[in-house]
Amino acid sequence: MILQGADALIECLKQEGVEVVFGYPGGAVLTLYDALYNSQFPHVLTKHEQGAVHAADGYARVTGKVGVCIATSGPGATNLITGIATAYMDSVPLVAITGQVGVSLIGKDSFQEADICGITTPISKHNYLVKRAQDLPRVIKEAFYIARTGRPGPVVIDIAKDVFAATMDYEYPTEVSLRGYKPLFAGDEEVLRVCLEELRQAKKPLLFVGGGATISNMAPEIRKFVNATGIPVISSLMGLGVVPGDSSEHLGMVGMHGTYAANMATVECDLLLGVGVRFDDRVTGSVEHFAANAKILHFDIDPAEINKNVCATIKVVGDLAWSLPLFNKLVKDFAPDIKEQTASWREQTAIWKQDKPMTYKSREGVIMPQQVIAKLNELAEDAIVVTDVGQHQMWTAQFFNFRQARAFVTSGGLGTMGYGLPAAIGAQIGLPDKKVIVFCGDGGIMMNCQELATAADNGFPVKVIVMNNQVLGMVSQWQRLFYGERYSHTSLKGRTDYVKLAEAMGVTGFKAEHPGELEDILKKALATSGPVLVEVALPSDEDVMPMVPPGGCLDKMILGEC
Amino acid sequence: MKYTLAVLVENRPGVLTHISGLISRRAFNIESIAAGHSEEVDTTRITIDVEVDDELELEQVVHQLSKLVDVIKIVNLTRVDHIERELALIKVKASKVNRSDLVDIVEIFRAKIVDVNRETMVVELTGEASKIDALCEVLVDFGIIEIVRTGKIALSRGPIAAKEM
């Protein structure tokens, strides 16, 4: 079939089952946009390329499908960078298509030219520069395959402008042939038996689940394992929801702002079973003292994650979809024994959990941030919850009970402010029947507030909760604790009226200032159709607690009111 | 500890960017890197000399490099019997007076003189890095104008190719 490059690209997207693309047109992708116009391919126009890439990311996280975004060359493409890096850190499958200047203009500092392959090399799983139309189908096939298989990640396809207009003999390849990319599925079964032996020896085993458990859709297997063995569970930020937040075995999030029980259990355990985790510094604190009494069994698909930050006693390299079902089979017969011999340990963890639960101190006449999260946890327990980055993100992790995997969308690794709102829009498009709530700080909302207009113009009914404490909360918390209360440029006291801002863009706005009105306003917001923004007035000096000072030991928490 | 890796990669534009980008962003300490065609048209062979603290760090280098889509295979040649060579071209001051001394030294090192003019000579030497270092040290007395070195390349002894190891 003879096709123009641009039409061929759209054919390829259809072949890959792409339902929607997020993007922003420009010079280098004019021909592609012309083809989109012809084909009526579903396209969401954001107000900024960064919005497009975060929306594609949010879409990918909740659906598990590959998110696709399009931007033009030069500034269009560079506006994607933060989003590509965000997706890379959290292993989100993404294909970013960027226009490039014409082949003859490449390397000449042409108008709107930027070396996107060069720029994205350290922040993408792979990238391509396409200069010939006939390469397009193979490259797109490979890009989607690389993005979604193995440890997922973003792939960038930079396409020279003339490729879109060139004609070619289109045929979509049925197979991918990549000599250097053979994503690992099955590993060494023998190692699983060794793990079982270790588990049977352990008196104080602890299961540590992370984003990999979500990505591999292995929450059901993990729940089966936990039910059978009764082993206590801790989660990384990315692992929340893999095990129901309100289950008795779940001790909560571990790490810098982890729960007392999770952190104490990590210090005390004699066996740590890490599943789809990468032992990030926000989890480990001092690496030397992290789980110092424990043998570490590390299950992960990426061999490079093993022994990167923390040395594993036993490594189980392979897809969790391979290892966990097999491991469950092996464990099955011994599960009752394991449950019995770990009973006193389970009791100990339950005592920690009971003694020092996640809590906060109320203040007279003031809405507390934790209260907002807890209230929405009551009112919208099945919602998809998206956050921006900072204090509110940690409070959400602490006070929202995530019951399902993929129900919590947050920029974990990169910690990207401005992520929340566009990601929520993407999540809403991915799951149109779900209630999508996004918590933002008054700092983060302003980084991509233009996307309120995207929500309004398209009727995406996201509920935006602006946690307005008039400061850049997390940074000011560090200034309070570690920089002698010198609040350098973290005051956000200004003249912005967030309700008016929302209304100006066509979003319904509410404001909650008193504890007495909070519930009603939140209920009203949830019941209102279309996008809604609720500004909640909060105190400026509330800290996220507990807190392990950076590089500290997990049992040396500043507890605050906890 | 120093290790020598043979890295087989797709012969495609951008591959070296991916490799050098990875090395710099992971802050790996690379002593030398040399790339060129291999026995297969579509494969480039890169020899990387890496300085690491321990085997764990080496494992990280290997695993991270392996993750690059264009990297086909990595072989740790340190562990197998192998030959290492580097090529150097050294431009050195050579007046009438000391030219014969230079020729003697070149002879001793089994190097070659590949260019001569009234003021300078270019000496070509192939060998292990230490041998090149030694020659350079001697030539310093004559006045070295410039040096270019290829970086180390390495090949295993015996009949098996890296791609089959």
Image: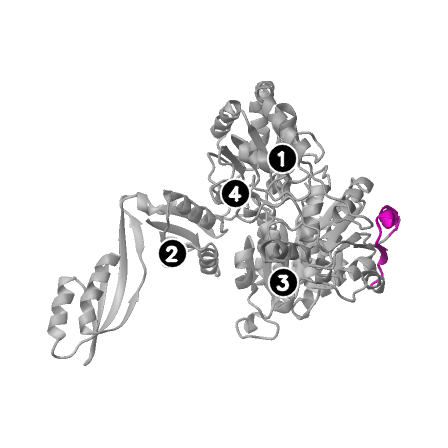
Q: CA distance from mark 2 to mark 3?
A: 33 Å
The residue labelled by disc 4 is A302
Q: CA distance from mark 4 to mark 3?
A: 28 Å
Q: CA distance from mark 1 to mark 2?
A: 43 Å
The residue labelled by disc 1 is A261
Between discs 4 and 3, the one toward the N terminus: 3
The residue labelled by disc 3 is A98
- Tag 4, which secondary structure? loop
* Residue type of the residue flagged with mark 4: Asp
Between discs 3 and 1, the one toward the N terminus: 3
Work out whether A165 lies above or below A432: below
Which mark, residue B57?
none
Asked if labels 4 and 1 touch by Cβ distance under 8 angstroms, the answer is no
How many C-alpha atoms fall within 10 Å of the one at disc 3: few (<14), some, or many (≥20)? many
Q: CA distance from mark 3 to mark 1?
A: 46 Å
Residue A416 in view: no
Numbered disc in front, either 1 or 4: 1
Q: Chain of mark 1?
A: A
Work out whether B6 lies above or below B120: above
- Tag 3, which secondary structure? strand
How many C-alpha atoms fall within 10 Å of the one at disc 4: few (<14), some, or many (≥20)? many
How many C-alpha atoms fall within 10 Å of the one at disc 1: few (<14), some, or many (≥20)? many
Between discs 1 and 4, the one toward the N terminus: 1
* Residue type of the residue flagged with mark 1: Ala
Numbered disc in front, either 4 or 3: 4
Q: Chain of mark 2?
A: B
Work out whether A218 lies above or below A425: above
